[in-house]
């Protein structure tokens, strides 16, 4: 730190752990040029300004040395003050260095923790998540520890929702399930305490474990106006994947959770997620106010703003639209099952042939009376089938009763199953000669 000061850089001290436990944001005046800030318990940093424009480049000091310089995305909003996207601190980074250029005035640097100490004092109590139909189980604001006293005004509502905007939060990947509430709290603190937004910008969030989290207050099933896509907030649901999707791909569980969010919006407000819609910009970095744009009903943030968000999720959107449509359709059903070749006498095979109402993942297995699986098959189609020649480990199976079970599961509805029995007799005598 001393060496950096002698080099002519502005140096801000590390945020102290002393003081009130609910002071989750430490803000300091920032100048054009290069500034180095010490870090202690912060989750993220960000830069805001009152007027003009700014280009912010940043890097981190870690035990491995300085990271490469990166340019921060500007995070436009229909409310609050201009600023950067949250700049999430890498593990064990002890310094943040920022270079600011442009003609911005009123520059400030914010260093944001997650309110962990306040929660530990018991001032917030989490409660059980609740179920919301096709959306599934939703973790509530209390579950991630929202301090409701921060909310600046009552929610605003559109007449309806016509599309879903997909984002990523850009925080470090590899977080544990238990870390998710603290990540959301840090984003919440940055949006409200630093940017001056009314509440957390996103309507909903999804983590890599497939859980859905309530974001901005306003009530599920209502067209709450968020602050997630400048110029296109009204009439859209903003859902953010927790993580940096420019460096990885979403898990299967996360993609399916995003699909559930899309299906929830589409069924609530009656639209087909595979179609397009014409939206009129209220002024965004990409489209000036009054411009009418044709967009997919499920579109990425970068389609209306100048940003890399939502990273690799942009390529996943066609599949997510299709998955959402699957979630909205009737659950699969087993149309027929036909068993042939029973009673079984090794090596004459027994065959189970089935038909489903549509292509869907399925599994089919035969078990003996002790529950041992003697044959199994899986697939994705409308035609499950499985054959067994009556052998077990190369020898004829013991005579007796066996069961078959077919299970079809599209991942969104309750699985459908059907079971039956068949007999296996003594081996064909001619086979033993």
Image: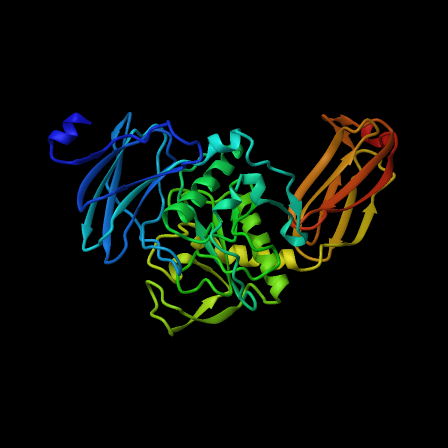
**Image side of residue 371 versus residue 152, left or right:** right
- The residue closer to the viewer here, 329 or 110, is 110
Residue 167 percent across, percent down from the top left: 44, 52
Residue at 72% x, 26% y is 394
Number of residue marks: 0
Q: Residue furthest left?
A: 7
Residue at 24% x, 43% y is 29
Q: Locate residue 292: give its quadrant.
A: bottom left
Q: Which quadrant is home to the C terminus?
A: top right
> On screen, 30 above or below 324?
above
- The residue closer to the viewer here, 341 or 407, is 407
Q: Answer yes or no: is residue 389 visible.
A: no
Q: Which quadrant is home to the N terminus?
A: top left
**Image side of residue 32 versus residue 230, left or right:** left
**Image side of residue 335 versus residue 269, left or right:** right
**Image side of residue 171 versus residue 157, left or right:** left
Residue 246 percent across, percent down from the top left: 38, 46
Residue 342 percent across, percent down from the top left: 86, 41
Residue 429 percent across, percent down from the top left: 86, 30
How is the model colour-coded? rainbow
Q: Residue furthest front?
A: 20
> On screen, 262 above or below 293?
above
Residue at 37% x, 27% y is 17
- The residue closer to the viewer here, 165 or 129, is 129
Q: Answer yes or no: is residue 58 visible.
A: yes
């Amino acid at each position: 730190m001393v060496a950096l000061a002698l080099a002519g850089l502005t140096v801000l001290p590390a945020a102290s752990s002393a003081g009130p436990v609910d002071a989750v944001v430490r803000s300091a005046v920032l100048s054009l040029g290069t500034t180095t800030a010490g870090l202690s318990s912060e989750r993220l940093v960000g830069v805001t300004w009152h007027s003009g424009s700014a280009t912010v480049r940043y890097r981190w000091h870690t035990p491995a040395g300085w990271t490469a310089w990166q340019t921060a995305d500007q995070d436009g909003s229909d409310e609050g003050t201009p600023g950067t996207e949250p700049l999430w601190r890498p593990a064990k980074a002890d310094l943040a260095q920022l270079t600011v250029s442009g003609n911005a005035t009123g520059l400030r640097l914010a260093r944001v923790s997650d309110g962990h100490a306040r929660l530990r004092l018991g001032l917030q109590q989490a409660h059980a998540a609740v179920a919301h139909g096709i959306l599934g189980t939703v973790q509530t604001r209390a579950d991630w520890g929202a301090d409701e006293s921060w909310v600046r005004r009552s929610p605003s509502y559109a007449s309806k929702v016509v599309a879903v905007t997909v984002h990523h939060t850009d925080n470090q990947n590899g977080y544990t399930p238990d870390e998710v509430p603290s990540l959301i709290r840090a984003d919440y603190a940055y949006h409200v305490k630093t940017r001056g937004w009314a509440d957390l910008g996103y309507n909903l969030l999804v983590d890599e474990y497939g859980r859905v989290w309530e974001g901005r207050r306003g009530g599920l099933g209502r067209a709450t106006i968020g602050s997630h896509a400048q110029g296109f907030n009204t009439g859209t649901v903003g859902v953010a994947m927790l993580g940096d999707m420019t460096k990885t791909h979403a898990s299967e569980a996360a993609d399916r959770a995003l699909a559930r969010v899309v299906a929830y919006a589409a069924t609530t407000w009656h639209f087909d997620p595979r179609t397009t819609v014409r939206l009129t910009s209220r002024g965004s970095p990409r489209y000036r106010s009054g411009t009418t744009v044709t967009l997919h009903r499920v579109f990425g943030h970068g389609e209306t703003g100048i940003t890399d968000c939502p990273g690799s999720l942009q390529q996943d959107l066609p599949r997510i639209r299709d998955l959402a449509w699957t979630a909205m359709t009737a659950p699969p059903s087993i149309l027929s099952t036909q068993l042939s070749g029973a009673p079984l006498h090794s090596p004459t095979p027994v065959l189970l042939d089935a038909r489903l109402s549509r292509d869907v993942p399925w599994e089919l297995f035969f078990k003996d009376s002790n529950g041992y699986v003697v044959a199994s098959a899986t697939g994705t189609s409308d035609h499950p089938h499985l054959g067994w020649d009556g052998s077990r480990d190369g020898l004829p199976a013991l005579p007796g009763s066996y069961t078959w079970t077919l299970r079809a599961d599209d991942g969104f509805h309750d699985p459908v199953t059907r079971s039956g029995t068949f007999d296996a007799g003594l081996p064909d005598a001619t086979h033993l000669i």
